[in-house]
Amino acid sequence: MLDKINDIKKEIQNFSIENEEELEAFRLEFLSRNGKVQSMFGLMKDVPNEQKAEMGKSMNEVKNLAQQTFDDAKIAIQKNDKKEFGALDDITLPVEPTYSGSFHPLTQALNEIKQIFLRLGFSIADGPELEDDFHNFTALNFPPDHPARDMQDTFFVRKSDDKDVDDLVLRTHTSPVQIRLMKEQEPPVRSIMPGRVFRNEAVTAKSYFQFNQVEGLYVNEKVTMGELIETLVMFARLMYGSDVKYRVRPSYFPFTEPSMEMDVWWENEKGGQWLEILGAGMVDPNVFQSVGVDPEKYTGFAFGMGVDRIAMLRYGIDDIRLLYDNDIRFLQQFKS
């Protein structure tokens, strides 16, 4: 038994500890719960009673040696680290700059849009990004053979010739949330619906295969086009300032009639240009009928705006791809 204790003692004395890895290896071999020192004490039950005192003393000496060896080696390694990285000893030296996180410019623009419409009395609704054909097209006045479907470059997740099986698509706009909301809630309805949408488009400086929209809907009795224009003008002034230059002009959308678009003047190095920020119009009666709302009793308006386009206009960004490249050098410019 004594020979075994002496063997462990010699192993401790001969163990080389030069770095953190070897220090941890020493701890595991000798000082851990399953290490040699603990195992050595487990043999005490086989020692005759008259020898227990002597053996206990020898074992404690080995235990103390192991612990002292570990502590001394740890201190030595730490001192060597300080010598190697001597700058740590000089607390007067300036620290390296650190960079705190910030909200993405798209998130900042979206949060501001939400706050504006909350001030204007709108609630916020949400819906799935994977939609069926009914909610994404049919209920929004896109019949199967309607030419307006060609306006949407759609990512089909499931396309079936079976009339009883609905196609599944990545939603091409957030308008399907309008349909879900009107099916679930009796008028009056006054809500915005932010979210990601997807189009099978070529990636260029002005277009991307995914982008962010905010859809808006107001349904009540005697809602007018004048209320729609007033709401959009108020939004533009709150978003871009009271001196913003804007214009509204006729347009076409399958789910609104009449329809319009709003442009904002964008000053740039070429002098400036009109930039479309949203489309809008009065909800088509066919849309009301598809969700069980009486078009003879209720009217309403809807609008949809691209968050990416608004963020580009607000921050002077000329390439939409910058918003999705996740280049930290670009994103650091937008700390709020």
Image (cartoon, rainbow, N blue to C red):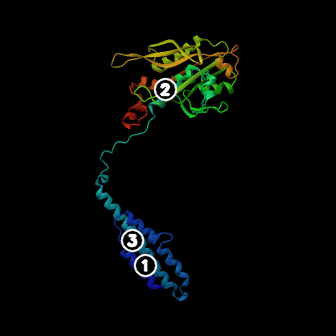
Residue 198 locus on image (x, y percent): 51, 30
Q: Earlier in the sequence, mark 2 or mark 3?
A: 3
Amino acid type assigned to the residue bearing label 2 in the image:
Val
Q: Nearer the viewer, mark 2 or mark 3?
A: 2
- What number of labels is visible? 3
Q: Earlier in the sequence, mark 3 or mark 1?
A: 1
Residue 231 locus on image (x, y percent): 55, 16
* Quarter of the image where the C terminus is located: top left
Q: Which mark is residue 69?
A: 3
- CA distance for labels 2 and 1: 71 Å
Viewer-closest of 103 and 283: 283
Looking at the image, residue 97 lies above or below residue 262: below
Q: SS at mark 1?
A: helix
Q: Which mark is residue 307?
A: 2
Q: Which residue is mark 1?
A: 8
Amino acid type assigned to the residue bearing label 1 in the image:
Ile
Q: SS at mark 2?
A: helix
Q: Nearer the viewer, mark 2 or mark 1?
A: 2
Amino acid type assigned to the residue bearing label 3 in the image:
Thr
Q: Is residue 31 visible?
A: yes
